Image (cartoon, helix red, strand yellow):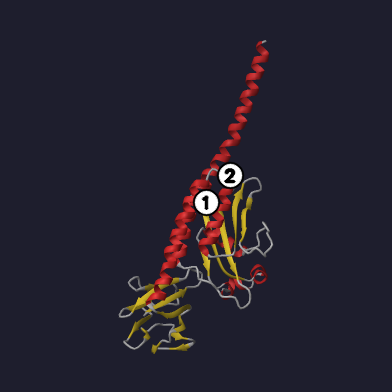
């Protein structure tokens, strides 16, 4: 039997840890902890989870903000096979799995990594196919994140603003709309600070939950990734997940998925920048050719 924890730090990707029977996992801000959660509500050494021979237990390590099991504060408490822990402001999903189920869960990461590699190879082959590149990059992010729709926004010097260059709707029953209808607040934050953003519980984030786009869109999970040339952010890729009433929440976007998304987006950025550079070179070069042709024609006429 193995235990799995999925920690949901506020405004960050979820973090997954497995604990084999016989091992202990310390949770806290201290870098030496088995599960490091960088949040001010978490103590340096906050709590410990271990198997005592009969079942799993959680022990608070003298934390400032306490450890709670299904809403009840605990100092040293047995854990049921499925429950929610709260350490400070961080919620943690705790579950116990047999070895076969644990292996199935871990195989998912292998499949995700293989998908990321395949998408990157396809992108390399599609780089010269014009408008297919933004669409391919966007589809890759939506699939890796397990989302239902996405948008790619790129800076457009002609209008002095960001415009939607690609959109994707995985739900065949939804309207196909290129206009951006995701969380404007999330995109603004990413364009402003240049850092990726993951929210696994949109309704639980005060700065998002009350926005009209969130309420009307029924969003539950979102991810937004910056596109940067190293000096400035020239775009963003946004994806979200919308679940109907009673529908399962789906797998969270964890630090593992965020790592894959970051690597894929970094590769995509190189191809997008190369394409933008070629576009900026093509127009002046074509004008130069036309101007040169006109000059030669004028010189030929003058020589007659």
> Do the CB atoms of the residues marked 1 and 2 lie less than 8 Å apart?
no
Q: Left or right: where does residue 130 sit relative to residue 178?
A: left
Up-down: is 50 above or below 37?
A: below
Identify the image quadrant of residue 174. bottom right
Up-down: is 164 above or below 302?
A: below
The label number, if any, that marks residue 139 in the structure image? none
Depth check: 47 or 240 in front? Answer: 240
Question: Dot 1, crowdedness within 10 Å: few (<14), some or many (≥20)?
Answer: few
Up-down: is 79 above or below 184?
A: below
Residue found 46% across the figure and 84% down from its top: 83
Quarter of the picture holding the N terminus: bottom left
Check disc 1 and report its element: helix, strand or loop: loop
Residue at the outermost top position: 304
x then y, percent, for residue 78 = 39, 89
Quarter of the picture holding the C terminus: top right
Q: CA distance from mark 1 to mark 2?
A: 24 Å
Circle 1 residue: 232
Q: Left or right: where does residue 249 sit relative to residue 110?
A: right
Q: Is residue 74 shown to the viewer in this render?
A: yes
Q: Left or right: where does residue 64 sit relative to residue 245?
A: left
The label number, if any, that marks residue 130 in the structure image? 2
x then y, percent, for residue 281 = 56, 37
Identify the image quadrant of residue 219. bottom right
Residue found 36% across the figure and 77% down from its top: 19
Task: Specify which label sits upstream in the sequence, 1 or 2.
Answer: 2
Check disc 2 and report its element: helix, strand or loop: loop
């Amino acid at each position: 039997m193995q235990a799995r924890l999925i920690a949901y730090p506020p405004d960050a990707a979820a973090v997954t840890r497995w604990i084999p029977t016989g091992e202990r996992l310390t949770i806290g801000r201290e870098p030496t902890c088995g599960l490091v959660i960088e949040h001010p509500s978490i103590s340096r050494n906050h709590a410990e989870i271990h198997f005592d021979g009969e079942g799993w237990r959680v022990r608070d390590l003298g934390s400032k903000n306490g450890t709670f099991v299904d809403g009840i504060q605990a100092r040293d408490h047995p854990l049921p096979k499925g429950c929610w822990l709260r350490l400070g402001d961080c919620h943690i999903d705790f579950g116990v799995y047999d070895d076969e189920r644990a292996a199935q869960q871990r195989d998912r990461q292998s499949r995700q990594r293989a998908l990321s590699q395949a998408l990157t190879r396809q992108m390399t082959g599609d780089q010269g196919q014009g408008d297919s590149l933004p669409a391919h990059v966007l589809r890759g992010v939506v699939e890796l994140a397990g989302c239902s729709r996405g948008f790619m926004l790129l800076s457009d010097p002609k209008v002095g603003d960001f415009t939607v260059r690609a959109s994707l709707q995985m739900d065949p029953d939804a309207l196909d709309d290129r206009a951006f209808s995701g969380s404007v607040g999330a995109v603004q934050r990413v364009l402003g600070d240049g850092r990726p953003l993951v929210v696994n519980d949109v309704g639980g984030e005060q700065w998002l939950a009350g926005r009209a786009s969130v309420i009307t869109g029924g969003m539950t999970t979102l991810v937004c990734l910056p596109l940067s040339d190293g000096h400035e952010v020239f775009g963003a890729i946004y994806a979200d997940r919308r679940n109907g009433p009673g529908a399962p929440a789906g797998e969270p976007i964890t630090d593992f998925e965020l790592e894959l998304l970051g690597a894929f987006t970094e590769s995509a950025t190189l191809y997008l920048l190369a394409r933008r550079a070629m576009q900026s070179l093509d127009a002046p070069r074509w004008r130069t050719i036309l101007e040169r042709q006109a000059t030669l024609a004028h010189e030929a006429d003058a020589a007659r």
